[in-house]
Image (spheres, rainbow, N blue to C red):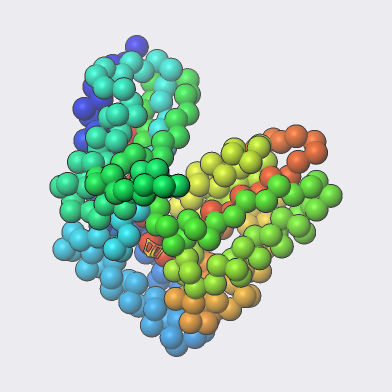
């Protein structure tokens, strides 16, 4: 049995939430650079250059990449041989988010009671937490601050099996077309297929953790990702929504088994500010 103090979890979440807000992952920056070479539109290339400059300034000065510092989505993989000592896990994670907010001067972007009060909680808590119990003693954590501009344009549809891959692809393309410039393109797409509606939605978010440019290990799914990418980029929305050939920088599709009568499809749009940080204790 491995013992982990939850104060270490708090410190790790705080560090990751700040790092994610100040520095884009190397794979995202590489995707911007690649797009700079392939984008046909001059204004699209200008947007990409500005995004690269913005990322450089944010990393050097340790200031947020975007005014929207996001809702903290936290994925935890915890081994069943791990014993946590201290605060409950969710409390430790939320303490980390609040600490990051204080130390990193991150905008407080979370409100309580969305239906009525909509009062700012003041410290970016609570986080959305996904926990997976796995064999052994690992403790892996990934923090993904999610901006509302792209989250708001995400969609889920319970397709029928007869809709097939054509229905799936059409739904994804329609989702991006409806979104237009609102999710701050160039975007990334996390797509969750299968399970139930809640499982598909969580899977689409989890798919966004996959590094840009990394294809699905299943070759048929990898081909499907490429087909969706080509269809989405043919929309011509372009960087900043100003028109261009690069609307989307990467598609990550994950699937899980589902009911014989279902074909759930969730599309989680991630904006150009594709922040994430991950590691282990
Ligand atoms: S969608 Fe992304 S880039 Fe646009 S304002 Fe929100 S966090 Fe910033």
Q: In this view of the protein, can residue 15 be seen by the observer?
A: no
State the residue at coordinates (76%, 41%): 262
Quadrant where the N terminus lies? Answer: top left
**Looking at the image, which residue is at 34% across and 72% down?**
51
Residue 248 drawn above or below residue 245: above
Q: At 45% from the left edge and 81% from the top edge, which residue is drawn?
A: 44
Query: In terms of image quadrants, where is residue 13?
Result: top left
Residue 207 image offset from top left, x and y in percent: 52, 47
> Which of 281 and 167 lies nearest the eye of the viewer?
167
Work out whether 87 lies above or below 111: above
Q: Quadrant of residue 43?
A: bottom left
Q: Would you place residue 276 above or below residue 226 in this image?
A: above
Residue 191 location in percent, x, y? Answer: 59, 51
Answer left or right for 56 relative to 201.
left
In this rendered view, identify the residue nearer to me: 275 or 199. Answer: 199
Residue 55: x %, y % from top left? 29, 66
List the single residue furthest toward the top. Answer: 1
């Amino acid at each position: 049995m491995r013992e982990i103090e939850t104060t270490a979890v708090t410190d790790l979440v705080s560090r990751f939430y700040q790092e994610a807000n100040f520095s884009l992952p190397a794979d995202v920056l590489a995707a911007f650079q690649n797009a700079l070479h392939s984008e046909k539109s001059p204004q699209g290339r200008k947007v990409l250059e500005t995004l690269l400059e913005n990322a450089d300034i944010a990393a050097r000065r340790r200031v947020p990449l975007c005014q929207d510092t996001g809702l903290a989505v936290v994925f935890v993989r915890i081994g069943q041989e791990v014993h946590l000592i201290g605060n409950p896990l969710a409390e430790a994670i939320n303490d980390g988010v609040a600490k990051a907010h204080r130390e990193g001067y991150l905008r407080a972007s979370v409100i309580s009671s969305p239906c009525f009060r909509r009062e700012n909680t003041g410290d970016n808590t609570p986080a959305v937490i996904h926990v997976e119990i796995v064999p052994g003693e690992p403790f892996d954590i990934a923090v993904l601050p999610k901006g509302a501009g792209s989250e708001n344009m995400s969609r889920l549809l319970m397709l029928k099996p007869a809709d097939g891959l054509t229905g799936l692809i059409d739904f994804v393309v329609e989702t991006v077309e409806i979104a237009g410039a609102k999710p701050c393109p160039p975007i990334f797409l996390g797509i969750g297929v299968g399970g139930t509606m809640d499982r598909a939605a969580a899977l689409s978010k989890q798919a966004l953790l996959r590094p840009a440019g990394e294809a699905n290990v299943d070759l048929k799914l990898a081909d499907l990702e490429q087909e969706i990418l080509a269809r989405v980029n043919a929309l011509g929305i372009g960087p900043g929504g100003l028109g261009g050939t690069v609307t989307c920088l990467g598609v990550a599709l994950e699937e899980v088994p589902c009911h014989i009568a279902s074909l759930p499809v969730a599309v989680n749009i991630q904006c150009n500010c594709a922040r994430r940080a991950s590691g282990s204790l």
